[in-house]
Amino acid sequence: MGLRTRRLLDRAFAAAGLFAVGLMAVVLLLVLGPIFARGAGAYVFRGTIEHRRFLLEQFGRGDAARVAAETAAAAAARAPAFALLSRFEETRDDLPPARRRELLADFREVRKGVSELLGPAPGAPALLPRNAYGQTRWDRARVKLDRVLRRQTWDYSGGVGRPVHTPREELYAGTALAPLFPLLRDGIEAMLLPRTTFYAGFLTDRSLDAHFFGGIGPEVLGTVWLTLGAMLLAVPFGVIAAIYFQEYTREGRVVLFLRSCVSTLAGVPSIVFGLFGLAFFINTLHVSPGKSVLAGALTLALLVLPTVIRASEEAIRAVPQAYKEAALALGAGRWHTVLTVILPAALPGILTGIVISMGRAAGETAPIIFTAAVSVGAAPGLLELFDRSTPALPWNIYNIATEHAAADEIRHVQYGMVATLVAIVLALNLAAIVLRARVARKLRG
Amino acid sequence: MAGLRQLVLTAAERRRRRTLAAAGRGLLFGVTAVAAVAVLLIIVFIARDALPFFRLRGFAEFFTTSGWYPSREPAQFGALAIFAGSALVTAGAALVAVPLGVAAATCLSDVLPFGVRQVVKPVIEILAAIPSVAFGFFALIVLAPWFQAHGAATGTNALNAAIILGIMALPTVVSVSEDALQAAGRELREGSYALGATRAETMLRVVLPAASSGIWAAALLGIMRALGETMVVLMASGNAAQIPHPWYDLTQPVRTLTATIASDMGEAEHVTGAERYAVLFAMGLCLLLFSFACNLLGERIVARERRRLRGA
C-alpha cells in the first residue's frame, strides 16, 4: 500500500471517529432542543384573560380588581358574538328547509367551538372546568379560532384522506350568523386580551380536569417522594456494602460471588424490577394494600443500589493509601479509621454517585408502573407515603402523551412535564459533574 | 493519666473486642449480602409467578406460535412475534450503537486532545442521564411524525424504536469500550508506532484486537440496555404483535416483551394467578434469564482476558 493511501486511510479513520462524537453531540441537541424550547412554553406564554380568571377563581392568585375589570371589558367585546349566535338560533326556522338541514349540524359545531374559545355564553351552565373557561393560551386560542372560522371536511377521492377547508363566512352567507366570523377574526384580541405571562405556578399547582388547566405540582411532588425514599433506602446499604468490599475483605470466593450479584442486579431490566416489586413487596410482603410510594421507593432502591455501591467503592478507592496508613500508625482501629478518615475523605465522591443515582431514580418509569404510579389524583402527604399511590412525572408523561383523550390539545403540558423532568435530572447530573471536578482538583492537591 | 487508653488489654477485654469486631464484620457482610439476596429473591419471585403459566399452557404455544390474544375467549398466548419484535428492535439498536460507539471510543481515547475529551465526556454522561421516558416522548412526538411525513406507513415502528434505543445504548458502549481501549496500554501503541504504522493501522490491527474482549463486553452491555428498555419501545414501536413481512422490514410496527409487560399488566393486575397475569411474568423470566446469560458471558470474557493478559 502506498504511503499516500495509508495517510488517506488514517485521515478517514480519524474522521469516522470525529463523526461519531459529533453525531452524539448533535443528537443531544436534537433531543434536548425541542424539549426545552417547547417545554419553556408551559411556563412562559401569551396568556389570555381566561388564564388570569382561572388562576384567581381556582387558586386565589392575581389582582382581583384588575381581573374583574378585564373580564368586564372582554365580556363587552364578546357580547355581540354571543348575540349573533342566539339571533341565528331564533331565526333558523326562517331558512329554506334544504339550507337549514345543511347548516344545523354545522351550527352545533360552531357553537361548541365558540364556547371552547371564549368560555360559556353568559348564563350557560358549566359542569367541567373545561367548559367553564375559554382558551387560556393564545396559541391554543388561535388554533380554536381557525376551527371556528373554517369548516374542515375530508376528501377521500385520492385514497388517502386530505383535509378540505371551507370558510364558514361563505357557508353562512346571507344568514344571521355571517357577521360572526369577521367579528371573531378581527376582535379576538379584545375578547381574550392576551398578554405575555410567566406561569411559575405550573411547577407547583395541581391540575384541573385531567391537565387541561393548572400545573404539574402533584407529579413533581410524587417524583420527589419516590426519589428521596429510594435514596434513603439505597444509600446506607450501598455505602456500607462499598466499605465492606473495599476495607474489610480480600478478594475471595464469597466476595467474588457478591460482586457478581451486584453486577447481575445492575443488569436486570427495569421492567423486571417492576414485576418483582409487585410480586414481592405488594403481593407477598404486603407492605401496602396496593400501589404505594413505599413499594415504589423500595423497588427503585434496589434498582439504584448497584450504582450507589460502585460509585462509593470508586470514591473510597480514590482516597490516598497514605491517609489510611497514617491513621493506623496513630493507633486508630480499623473501624475508627473508616469512620473518621476514609469516609470523610471519600464523601464528595460518594455524594457524586448518590446525586447521579438520584437522577436515575427520578427518571425511571418502568419500575413504578405496577408499584407506585397512578395517572390522576393528588400527591400523598408525609403520613400517607406508606399506603397511598402517587402521580409521578415519568409515568404521567407517558400517560398524558399516549392515553389522554385529548393528547393533542395539551401538548404544552406534555412538553412542560418532560422539560421539567429532564431539567431536574440534568441539574442533578451537572451538580455531580461539578462536584467531581472539585474532588479531582482537591485530590491533585 | 486520665484519658490515656490502656495499652495492655486483659484477656476478657481482648475477647470482648474481638467479638465486637467479628459482630461488626458480620453486620457489614449481612448488609452487603442484601444485593445477593435481592438477586435471589428476584429470580424466585419472578419464577414463582411465571410457573403457573407454563404449568397450565405448556411451552409449545408460548414459544412457537404467534397468536397473541390474551383477552379473547379462548385466549391465545403465542409470544413468538413478541420475541421476534424484541430481537428485531434490539438488533437494530445494536447496529446503530456498536459501530458508532466503538468509533467514538477510539476517537475519544486516541484521537482527540485531552482538553476536548474533557468536554465530550460530560456530553456522553448527559446523554446517558436523560430519562428513557423523555426519549420515548421525543420518538413519539417528534420522530414519528417525521417518519410519517417521509413515506413510512406508520411513524411508530421498529426503525423508530431501534434508532432511539441505539442512541440510548451509545453512552454505555462508548464508556465501556473506551475503558477497554485505555486498558490496552501505551506499550502496544508505542511499539506499533515505532514499527511505522499509522494511527489507523495501530488502532485497527493492534489496539482493537488487544481490547476485543472489552469491546465485546461493551456490545453485550449495550444490547442488554436496549433489550431491557421499556418506555421507548412502548411509545415508539407501534405495539403490533406481528412478525414483519419480510422479516427485515423495520418500517413496520412491532411489539416487544418489555412493552407487552408494561401495557398488559394494567388489565391483568387484579387477577393474580390467572394466566394473563402469569404470562407476563413468564416474559419477565425470559428477559431476566437472558440478561443473566449476557452478564455471565460478559464476566467470562473479561475474566478470560484477564487470565490471558496475566499469562502473557
Image (cartoon, grey):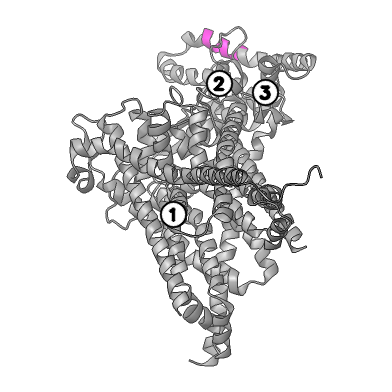
Residue at the spot x=58%, y=71% of the render? B107
Depth check, front residue: A147 or B10: B10
Q: Is residue A87 magenta?
A: yes
A382 on left or right of A171: right
Residue at the spot x=40%, y=51% of the render? B227
| Disc 2 packing (10 Å; few <14; some 14–19; many ≥20) | some
Residue at the spot x=19%, y=35% of the render? B56
State the CA–CA distance, disc 1 to disc 2. 40 Å
B201 on left or right of A44: left
| Tag 2: amino acid | Glu
Q: Which chain letter matches label 1?
A: A
> In the rendering, which numbered label is found on residue A51?
3
Where's residue A137, x and y in %? 64, 29
Where's residue B202, x and y in %? 53, 82
Considering every residue shown, the one lying at the far right of the view is B1
Provide the residue designation for mark 2: A384
Taking the image as drawn, is residue A238 in sight? no
B279 on left or right of A285: left
Residue contact at pointers 1 and 3, CB within 8 angstroms: no
Q: What element carries label 2?
A: helix
Quadrant of image for the N terminus of chain B: top right
Where's residue B284, x and y in %? 34, 42
| Tag 3: amino acid | His
Depth check, front residue: B144 or A234: A234
Provide the residue designation for mark 1: A254
Work out whether mark 2 precedes mark 3 in sequence or the reverse, and give the earlier one: 3
In the image, residue A313 above or below residue B74? below
Q: What element carries label 1?
A: helix
Q: Which chain letter matches label 3?
A: A
**Residue stretch rendered in magenta on the structure:** A83-90
Q: Which chain letter matches label 2?
A: A
State the CA–CA distance, disc 2 to disc 3. 32 Å
